[in-house]
Image (tube, coloured by chain):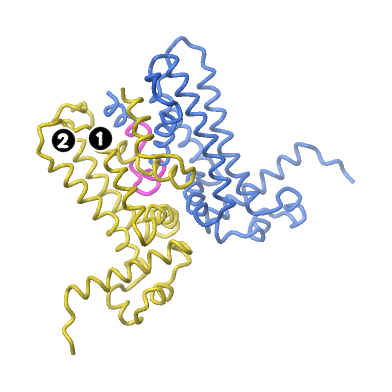
Chain colours: A yellow, B blue
């Protein structure tokens, strides 16, 4: 038997996740079945189940993929060792630009998947747990930004950084919803409005 | 035949909309059919079709109901004739409190319906049109707030009020998503974070 290399495993796993993404974009989470994902992946049922035991596991992998990119972005923001103080709105602008880049990648707009996931989480406890976990983690990155900005003196140090993280994180769904349902927002117009309020 | 009074019509219509709301909360927009709504309303099919010709019309009525309350709120904010200059974050705090009041009303949390509607709008052009129209209208109220705050000198008058409205409106979905999926935000914690960024 040929030895399955790690590279091969990673590629196969990505193939399944991509297939699941296209199924969800086409018919939503609720209607997507393991059989749909298996058919779309062009792999055997055995091969797919070797990587993921359930639809929920694949959905977790889709979310993980999308967020691992955002994690990298936060690392580059927080590791930035210039002497400039950290400006939270500048961070938010970088996050929004990053969302556009991810959304426009071939293989489907993951922000559309996020909106589907929110709806599904309200009717499926397993999905609610996945979404809650991922968003708590993402929001904790904004809390790190808040603490750094507090240390840099650009945000009031007396305010709970978790509350600041709620507000910073809270801009992101509002951007995604307007972009997908109204279609006229850009990172520039949104942060211009924000800066005017912040003045 | 007894004369159907206007009061009777309004009550019947509300009964149908409430039935549709409970169906959507239970099984989502996609799976809800006119037959489900008719059964839940305890009216005859003929009676229900006398008010609404399609599921999309009922969904429009649910959205209209939720937004008519928000319209009243904006009117009271904009008609406020005190000499105090309008503070956008104070407006936002009132909007968030209002959302909690609406969400906690008997008959089901309409913010859960909103999240379902966003997902459905991505797969149903009729729903996308309804959602786009309603949100454009709601956002135009935030643009009025922005213009008023610009006249009062609390927001930079050089910035496009439509961009300010994007940012103000954008806080609301972020609040709803965190409240429903993570569960730890309150209007107070969210606006405390916001005020810290705005400082």
Q: Is residue B133 magenta?
A: no
Say which quadrant the N terminus of chain A sits in. Answer: bottom left
Q: Is residue A112 above or below residue B186?
A: below
Residue that appears at 61% across and 52% down: B20
Say which quadrant the C terminus of chain A sits in. Answer: top left
Residue that appears at 27% across and 59% down: A65
- Residue A166: x and y, percent? 30, 38
Q: Range of the magenta residues?
A: B176-190
Q: Is residue A114 above or below residue A44?
A: above
Q: Are discs 2 and 1 less than 8 Å apart at CB? A: no
Q: Examine the image and state in which quarter residue B170 appears.
A: top left
Q: CA distance from mark 2 to mark 1?
A: 13 Å
Q: Which residue is mark 1?
A: A90
The residue carrying pointer 1 sits among few (fewer than 14), some (14 to 19) or many (20 or more) residues within 10 Å by Cα, namely: few
B39 relative position to A129: left or right? right
- Residue B102: x and y, percent? 51, 37
Residue that appears at 56% across and 36% down: B67
- Residue A58: x and y, percent? 33, 67
- Residue B64: x and y, percent? 60, 40
The secondary element bearing badge 1 is classed as helix
Residue that appears at 76% across and 52% down: B47
Instruction: Give residue A148's mark.
Output: 2
Q: Return the disc, 2 or 1, that comes first in the chain's sequence.
A: 1
On what subunit does the disc labeled 1 rest? A
Instruction: Give residue A124's mark.
Output: none
Residue lying farthest right? B1
Q: Examine the image and state in which quarter residue A9 appears.
A: bottom left
Instruction: Check chain identity for marks 2 and 1: say if they share one.
Output: yes
On what subunit does the disc labeled 2 rest? A
């Amino acid at each position: 038997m040929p030895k399955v290399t790690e590279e091969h495993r990673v590629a196969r796993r990505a193939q399944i996740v991509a297939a699941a993404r296209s199924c969800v974009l086409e018919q939503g989470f609720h209607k997507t079945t393991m059989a749909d994902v298996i058919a779309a992946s062009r792999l055997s049922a055995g091969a797919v189940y070797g990587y993921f035991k359930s639809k929920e596991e694949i959905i977790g992998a889709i979310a993980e993929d999308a967020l691992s990119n955002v994690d990298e972005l936060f690392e580059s923001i927080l590791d930035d060792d210039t002497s400039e103080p950290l400006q939270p709105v500048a961070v938010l602008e970088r996050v929004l630009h990053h969302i556009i880049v991810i959304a426009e990648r071939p293989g489907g707009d993951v922000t559309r998947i996020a909106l589907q996931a929110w709806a599904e989480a309200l009717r499926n406890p397993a999905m609610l747990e996945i979404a809650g976990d991922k968003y708590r983690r993402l929001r904790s990155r904004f809390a790190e930004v808040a603490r750094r900005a507090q240390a840099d003196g650009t945000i009031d140090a007396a305010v709970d950084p978790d509350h600041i993280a709620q507000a910073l994180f809270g801009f992101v769904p509002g951007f995604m919803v307007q972009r997908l349902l109204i279609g006229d927002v850009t990172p520039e117009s949104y942060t211009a409005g924000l800066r005017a309020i912040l003045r």
